[in-house]
Image: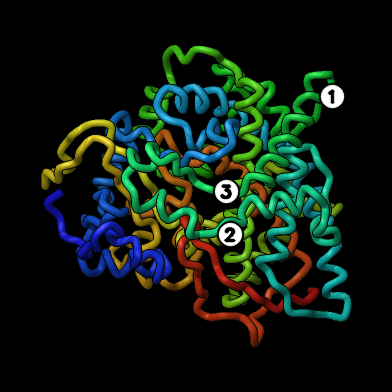
Amino acid sequence: MGVSGPKPLPLFGTFLERCLNPMPHLDQSYVRKYGNIFGIFNGTDPVLLIADPELIKQVLVKDFHRFTNRRELQTEHPFINKNLFNTTDDTWKRLRTIMSSTFTSGKMRKMYPLVRQCLQEYLDHLDGVTRDGGADIDAKAMHQNFTMDVIASCAFATKTNSQYDPNNPFVVNGRNVFVFRAIKLIPAFIFPKRINKLLGIRTHLGEEPNNWICDLASHMLEKRRNGFKNNDFLQLLIDAKAGDQNNNKDANADNLEAHHVNQGEEEMLAEKSVLNGNIGAKSLTDDEIIAQSWLFLIAGFETTATTLGYISYLLALNPSAQEKLYDEVMGAVDSDGEISYEDLQRLPYLDACLSETLRLFPPLVRLERIASEDMKLGTKGVTLKKDQMIEIPVYPIHRSEKYYENPDEFKPERFLPENRHKLIPYTYFPFGTGPRNCLGMRFALMEVKLAISHIVMRYRFKRCPKTEVPIEYFNLTPMLTAKSITLGIEKR
């Protein structure tokens, strides 16, 4: 590739460094040592890492047609491989075009009551925990229970209450989907793709829980085909058709959320050009619906719960920001103590607190794309071969002194509407950017904002003796996963 980088070991490449160090810290050290363009090795396969905003824009937006795909993670389940995250080329384009209609603001408004109902059960649990005034809580575990209930309700039409019934079959199997032995992933990372295919090496995600989840989705889908309907994600997938994505669009909501994915005129034109054209079948097959329901669990459980944990942690460490957020929320509640979907989207300090949380703690540590052809990248002429992977280290970019003053400090004011013009494009992308950004962003933002606003309205997060500062992360995970987030909480 003609770039610098850490020295690889035979067979393993630089993968052992990833095994021994949390990836966010490893990436920070790489960027500091080698600059904004450097190379590593997954086994014997070279990987180019780019942390330069202009190159990031080239890969994710301008030359998207050359970098459409991610790494394929083949699993043992025939349905799961059909999920949006894992599909490639025209199959991805077709799924994305159809599913764009499921995440408009109008559709999110319909699911708002389901999320609010799950939240009420969480608030009732917190009432019990704080009955005597205050307590120390495992914020990570409690938020996970809430997000699991939301997924069960919205994607599987299943009632759970994870706070009180952790042995519910959906909760047990939903959690076990994420339980796997890391050693089984190593061959998929260190051997070239062709060797993995030849040897039949697949990404192991736990066969039993995956089968159980997919069987449940299939059963609920059959009920819907027999006439039962509901305002949930499963129904949206059934009803989704290509060409419907302009229905129920809210331009104001789009503008409020655009900074999360660097969405300007150029980005919208790029997405439009990619998703236009003949895509074949314009609705989802049953297998594809089941795969997307499974993806809703995979993409919406740990990431959303972790973000809730991080914003709770930051508010506990920054009490003045917490009180400012409380004042804003209280100014938006109605006579019943509720916040409407529309008003929730229009709370600037709430969005600023969440944006700053996502800057400091992005859900994914790296973004990745695969080159579809041999090419030169950027003005320096870095050579890429067809099928070579490019990764974008999100964490060190979000925390770079080049782009953010005092980058490790929690300063929500950076993201207030009057300050967003100061943000350097492509230095903040917690949901990715370009045509392949996170389609579920709007739902995730709604879920976190609704939860944190109602919690702050009733309770106060505090630092306690068990609160770890700084947070420690797990190794060998693509997500920025904290080992522990223990906080104090008290009633207002």
Is residue 418 visible to us here?
no
Residue 161 appears in which quarter of the rendering?
bottom right
Give the label, 1 or 3, closer to the camera: 3
Residue at 77% over, 31% down: 231
Mark 1 crowd level (few <14, some 14–19, many ≥20, 10 Å Cα)? few
Whole-percent x, y for residue 304 in the image: 61, 54
Residue 431 drawn above or below residue 101: below
Q: Where is residue 467 in the image (x, y as percent from the top left)?
A: 61, 81
Q: Which of 80 and 97 is in front in this view?
A: 80
Quarter the C terminus occupies = bottom right
Q: Which mark is first along the chain, 2 or 1?
A: 1
At mark 3, the secondary structure is loop
* Drawn side of residue 158 relative to residue 462, left or right: right
Residue occupied by mark 1: 228
- When the figure is inspected, residue 128 is found, relative to residue 362, above or below; the finding is below
Mark 3, residue position: 205
What's the residue type where badge 3 is placed?
Leu
What amino acid is labelled 1 in the image?
Phe
Q: Disc 2 or 3, which lies upstream in sequence? A: 3
- Give whichever of 487, 295 is nearer the camera: 295
Q: Earlier in the sequence, mark 1 or mark 3?
A: 3
> Residue 302 got which mark?
none
Asked if labels 3 and 2 touch by Cβ distance under 8 angstroms, the answer is no
Distance (Cα) linking label 1 and label 2: 34 Å
Amino acid on which disc 2 is placed: Thr
Mark-to-mark CA distance, 2 and 3: 23 Å
Specify the quadrant of the image occupied by residue 239: top right
Please give left or right for residue 191 compared with residue 132 in the image: left
Do tag 1 and tag 2 residues touch (Cβ < 8 Å)?
no
